[in-house]
Amino acid sequence: MNRMIIFLVIALATATAHASGLPFFPNTNVPDYTAKLVVHDTLDGKDNWRVVQHHNGWTHVEETQGDETYIWYGHFFQNIVLSTVKKDGEEIKRFSIRQVEPSYDYLGIKQVKETNDVETVGGEECRWRQIVRRPPPEGPIWMTCLTSDGIEVATKVLFSKGKLMSEARLTEIKRGPVPEAEVLPSRQLFDASTWLKPLRTYADRPPSAVDFEAKLVTRASDNPSNPSIDKTSEVRLLRHYPWWFRRRDGKDGSIRIEVWNELENQGIVYSSSKRERRIVGGRSSPEPKPPFSRFSSQTGMENLGEQGQFLGENCTWYNLTPNMAGSSHKQCITSDGIPLKDEQWYGRSAAESFDTVAFTRRPVDIDEMQPPREYLDPSAWGLALQ
């Protein structure tokens, strides 16, 4: 990222990470505005349109690419971004929201370098700055052109040797009040029922899919040289065919809650750690069957021909990720579908291994399989949604 032009390092309030999809802001005093930019990608030679609305720190960006519209909502200085996509005007079928500690964000800004390059774009005079991010120096060069009041009216992404990769340039701008409702997402995105409502009527439960609740704990590492394996993580697992609920509480305080439908590409995930929080939701019916589900790593059920007995129950070992190079996920499962052992491997090293220490076959209500409401509450993400 060493574009050798005259520059000064400017001490702006930009230690925060740059949320992907949002414009760069030099400070918190950027006025309300609505802008339209044309985006050119040299890799495919196509031009797309981007519309940006900003109000009181919150920004709404929509970029049209063919029959798809990519949408971002976020707050640059709170390092939070929500992203989603619509196709042909259809309802939103997936979304994610992420908030990251600035010091950990791989998109984080290490430095902002001011240049002497001044240009007029879309009738607005702007000065170019280089944004130095955390990836290695051989990565892309990120440039932004800001007006005197801090509005980003042009961007450039250059290959490491300076050749243009993509650029965006202002065509229209209107300074003036932007309604708050225009820069905030729909509350519906944070409603678990949006992503967990059945897409169709399912066939009767097979004998191998009993309802149950189980508690699993991590096994002591089979590889003592790998101290990163958490020995005391716990998992609560519920099944209500065709739904699964899995909550993992890590020794380090991390939480991961997954609710998914084993017959559809449908579910919701909440995760939090010292570094970041994230929600991912989606629902799209397979036509006729998807090659994978974003909510489960399982790609099949290969019987390994090995038997086991744990907690007084017989089980059979299965590979849940057959034909997947470099990793494997194995479980020893009872005839009615309860995993008693769970092992995940990357190469020759165990990534994490769980033992089931208690389980109960019982009816599980779908209402039990919901992420806690406080994790999905928009106000917990700084969003005052109506």
Image (spheres, rainbow, N blue to C red):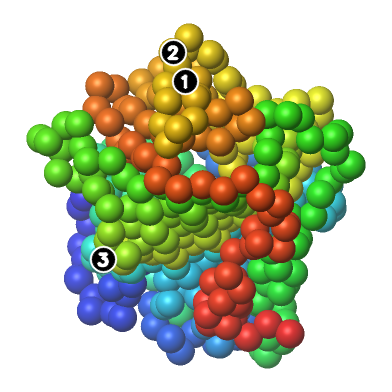
Query: Which structural element holds mark 3?
Result: loop
Task: Measure the C-alpha gap from mark 1 to mark 2.
Answer: 5 Å
Foreground mark, 3 or 2? 2
Is the C-beta separation of discs 3 and 2 under 8 Å? no
In the image, residue 347 sits, relative to residue 175, either above or below, namely: above
Label 1 amino acid? Answer: Trp
Q: Residue at x 43, y 77 (%)?
A: 78
Q: Are marks 1 and 2 in contact (CB under 8 Å)?
A: yes
Q: Which mark is residue 306?
A: 2
- Residue where numbered disc 3 is placed: 103
Earlier sequence position, callout 1 versus callout 2 = 2
Q: CA distance from mark 1 to mark 3?
A: 42 Å
| Residue located at (68% from left, 90% from top) | 177
Where's the C terminus, which quadrant?
A: bottom right
- x and y percent of residue 285 in the render? 79, 39
Q: Residues within 10 Å of mark 3 (few under 14, many from 20)?
A: some
